[in-house]
Amino acid sequence: MVFIHDTEMSLRAAAALVNTLPETDTAGADRLLSQAELDAYLAEFSYTGAFRRDETELAAVRANRPRLRELWDVDRDGAVPLVNAMLRDGRALPQLVIHDGFDWHIHATEPEAPLATRMLVESAMAFVDVIRSDEWGRVRVCAADDCQSVYVDFSKNGSKRYCDTGNCGNRMNVNAYRRRKARESA
Ligand SMILES: [Zn+2]
Ligand SMILES: [Zn+2]
């Protein structure tokens, strides 16, 4: 296990949120336009606390995306001011809590804080762990030449090259195979 479970889940949630951006989608589609799409996201990555389920909340969650996306463009030192700003803006105050069948974990925001704030701070707390454990090299963009999806590599040896969102690895292997065949028959 590279990171503790909470951290891994938060990093997966952050990457999945970023991957709803149109620039990460091969078809250029925005995958977080409606309450239904936010509901689907929250069904996969559950958050506790208050939900407004209105346009303001959706807009605020959407606005988290480019801010989180920046983390995939910087190195470890460059990530520090971005993560600190998220913690500061979210008025993070880490507290150990236990609820709903989860074991002891950290909440750094009040349950009444806006959903987008809770999401941003939780992501920031997870990236704190990545920085502290000096594993920033695991924060990566898919290596497929036609995919801009982001991911965090949780593999033991840190050798994962492609995102989780499709079959980028297979597609690149097929492409390489075709290129090799084309060369051989030329
Ligand atoms: Zn909790
Ligand atoms: Zn990919």
Image (cartoon, rainbow, N blue to C red):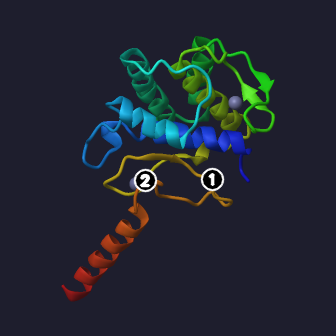
Q: Quadrant of residue 31?
A: top left
**Disc 1 residue lies near ligand 2 with CB under 8 A:** no
Which tag, 1 or 2, sits closer to the chain's start? Answer: 1
Q: Is residue 102 left or right of residue 41?
A: right
Q: Is residue 24 left or right of residue 29?
A: right
Q: Quadrant of residue 40?
A: top left
Disc marking residue 154: 1
Picture residue at 58% right of the left edge, 52% below the top: 153
Dot 1 falls on a residue whose secondary structure is loop
Q: Is residue 109 left or right of residue 120?
A: right
Where is residue 79? Give x, y as percent: 57, 29
- Label tally: 2
Q: Is residue 116 left or right of residue 93?
A: left
Picture residue at 55% right of the left edge, 24% below the top: 120
Relative to 175, say whether 105 is above or below: above
Q: Nearer the viewer, residue 167 or 76?
A: 167
Q: CA distance from mark 1 to mark 2?
A: 15 Å
Q: Nearer the viewer, residue 138 or 125?
A: 125
Q: Which residue is the site of mark 2?
A: 165
**Disc 2 residue lies near ligand 2 with CB under 8 A:** yes
Relative to 57, say whether 21 is above or below: below
Query: CB atoms at circles 1 and 2 under 8 Å apart?
Result: no
Q: Nearer the viewer, mark 1 or mark 2?
A: 2
Q: Amino acid at mark 2?
A: Thr
Q: Amino acid at mark 1?
A: Phe
Picture residue at 65% right of the left edge, 34% below the top: 126
- Which quarter holds ligand 1? top right
Where is residue 71? Give x, y as percent: 51, 33
Where is residue 149? Give x, y as percent: 41, 47
